[in-house]
Image: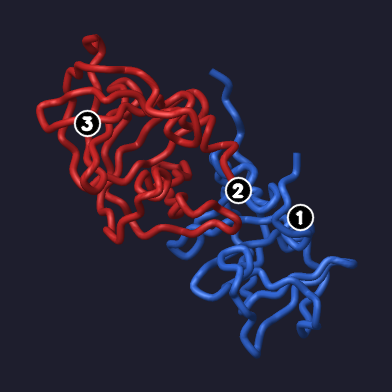
Amino acid sequence: MTDVQAEVIEGLVLCRVGEDRLAVRAREISSFDVPHAGARYAGEGFSPQARAPAEARLLRHHDTALVVDTVEVHSERLTLLSVPAVLVRAWGGALCGFVEAGGLLWPVISLERFAQGPEVVS
Amino acid sequence: MADVHGHLVFACGSSLYAVPADTASEVVNLPSLTRVPGAPGHLLGVFAHRGEVLPVVDLTRLTGHPLDEVFKRAVVVRTPRGAVALPASRVLGVATLEGSFERLGDTGVHQHLRGPARAAAGEVAIIDTQTFIEFLSTAG
């Protein structure tokens, strides 16, 4: 049996999206901003009808932008749990893994891939 | 045809399902689930269990007969292709099944169900766990 070393993440941005949660590696975000028209709302990943609240935040990295409800920077080292096989293709393969923080499980996404939309990446 | 290896039989709503006993690793109490963006409707969410993330797959939605039932327990099925938790209304235990082991359909999840087999509690659909998890991995 192969002993696979678990990946450790240091520096995450924990995001609330309606009743749901997402996390993004801090190094994938260059700035927080005010949302602009046309930026994808992360809530679409959970419900196509989801709409961003008035006081939403924008995660930006170069030309990539994603709107979330709230953000919280988490600096502790966390173990990245693997994506189950049945979820590898979810939201175009944007899921990188999961972390446990504050007693909750958070899906960790690639900001760039998530912002591109749910089309399946082959 | 008789069952040689034994199956774990469980109820999901009014339907009975069975998985090979050697792929049913445990029965767990379901905690609150974390929803995953882009997950198909039959995937209710995930939970962390002993350092592993387990997806919870609702058989009632997958077979087109969704229930409003809030499931409290699940059967964890583990194969080399991955592990899933299948919510159960009741877990009836390991039984030797008899009857048909033919595929129940040619499309969708029914390709991965076999039967109808018979257990003491009634007719059972047997989940072909290997191909079932492969199917879930490609189902949108």
Instruction: Report the chain holding disc 1.
Output: A
* CB under 8 Å between discs 3 and 1: no
| Residue B120 in the figure: left or right of residue A23 | left
Residue A66 screen position, x and y as percent: 74, 70
Residue A15, compared with residue B60, is above or below; it is below
Q: Earlier in the sequence, mark 1 or mark 2?
A: 2
Tell which chain the image draws in blue: A
Question: Which quadrant, please, contains the N terminus of chain B?
Answer: top left
Label 2 and label 3: CA atoms lie apart by 32 Å
What amino acid is at disc 1? Arg
Q: Position of residue B24 (x, y in %)?
A: 31, 29
- Residue occupied by mark 3: B9
Dot 1 falls on a residue whose secondary structure is helix
| Image coords of residue A13 (percent x, y) | 66, 67
Q: Residue furthest bottom?
A: A54
Amino acid tagged 3:
Val
Q: Amino acid at mark 2?
A: Gly
Position of residue A42 measured from the top left corner of the image (x, y, whole percent): 66, 69
Check the rendered structure and report the hue given to chain B: red
Toward the viewer: A98 or A74? A98
| Residue located farthest toward the left when viewing the structure as drawn | B120
Disc 2 marks which residue?
A97
Residue B21, picture quadrant: top left
